[in-house]
Image: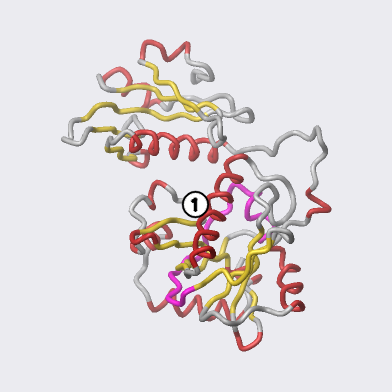
Amino acid sequence: MDKEVDPHVLTVIDEMRLSGPRLTPVEIVAKMGVFDAREKPFDQAWLATGDNVIATIWAEYVSVGTGNRWFCLESLDTQLRAGGGTRSPFQVQRAKDRLALLKRTFDAGQGFRAVLQTNRVAIAELESNKAAKVSTRVRDDAEWHVASWEPEEQIAVLVRGPRGWTPDEAEVKAAAARGSVPVVAEAEPEADAPPAPVSREEVQAAAMDYVMRHFKGYGYNAEDLTSKNIGYSIEASNAKGATLLRVVVKGTSTGSPKFQLTSEEQACSVREPLWRLLVVSDAGSAIAQHKIYKPSEMSQTPGFEAQG
């Protein structure tokens, strides 16, 4: 939340926001060279054109060190949330993808582009509250870099501006107190603890991401039409533009095993010859897989729940 952001940092973000065009969070990333930004709205790092890495920097975690140098700590623990608690499988994968891109820049001695973001909920809830949304996102014209990568301490230090400066020990401790690194003592789960709950929204987002990657991996064009509410989620076509399938995508997981079709999706299954139901099981996990069903097979589909 804005009140948790360092006043100096918040002032700079407000200046950036007011001086640039009014763009949505996804449009900002897209204009920075991420062609599939609309398919990855919840990602925290992206690979843009020219092999440039773009990463989200949560302003709530940014500290101001000696000489007004900005920095933040990056946890290398993909299993634990910053505020404490275990991440869901989908959150773990996003964390792994982000760290892989940041490590790539560190190994190559390169910087990365950043989008500075403030959020609508307190930092302790950023990964646990499914309603957590972006408050402000702006493109930072200053380059960031990974100044240090410490696997043993499970921390990396991200610094804004030229190389050659790193925060001292006291500054790092103060930054850690802001909550950007996991509280291990509170977050260690019992050996038989149940997995963290996964929201329906996360499962569906993971399923959509899986299907888009699947189609594109086979050389097909895939267009996400979910927002149009026309009875199907994705239209797949070949290189010549011929439509192959119009699929409704539904994701299931251990914590969210059921799904329903909307009335528009039900109606489209009757009128559209290319309509299919594509179900991704274990969405968001390393063992995700899918199966496609015809309208006539819909009622026997695992997880399908008819509207009451």
Q: Residue at x 41, y 34 (%)?
A: 211
Q: Position of residue 248 (x, y in %)?
A: 38, 28
Q: Height in image: 145 above or below 11?
A: above
User: Where in the figure is residue 73, as x and y percent of width and height?
Assistant: 65, 67
**Residue labelled with disc 1:** 43
Residue depicted at x 79% and y 35%: 193
Label 1 secondary element? loop
163 vs 42, nearest the viewer: 163
Q: Position of residue 27 (x, y in %)?
A: 36, 59
Q: Position of residue 42 (x, y in %)?
A: 49, 50
Would residue 116 appear left or right of 298 to someone viewing this image?
A: right
**88 in the magenta segment:** no
For the N terminus, give its image quadrant: bottom right
For residue 307, say whether it is visible.
yes
Numbered range of the magenta stretch: 123-143
Q: In the drawing, does residue 172 fall left or right of residue 22?
A: right
Residue 128 within the magenta-colored segment of the rendering: yes
> What amino acid is found at the position of numbered circle 1 in the picture?
Asp
Identify the residue at horizontal 50%, vertical 38% (top origin).
206
From the viewer's side, name the closer residue of 204 and 64.
Answer: 64
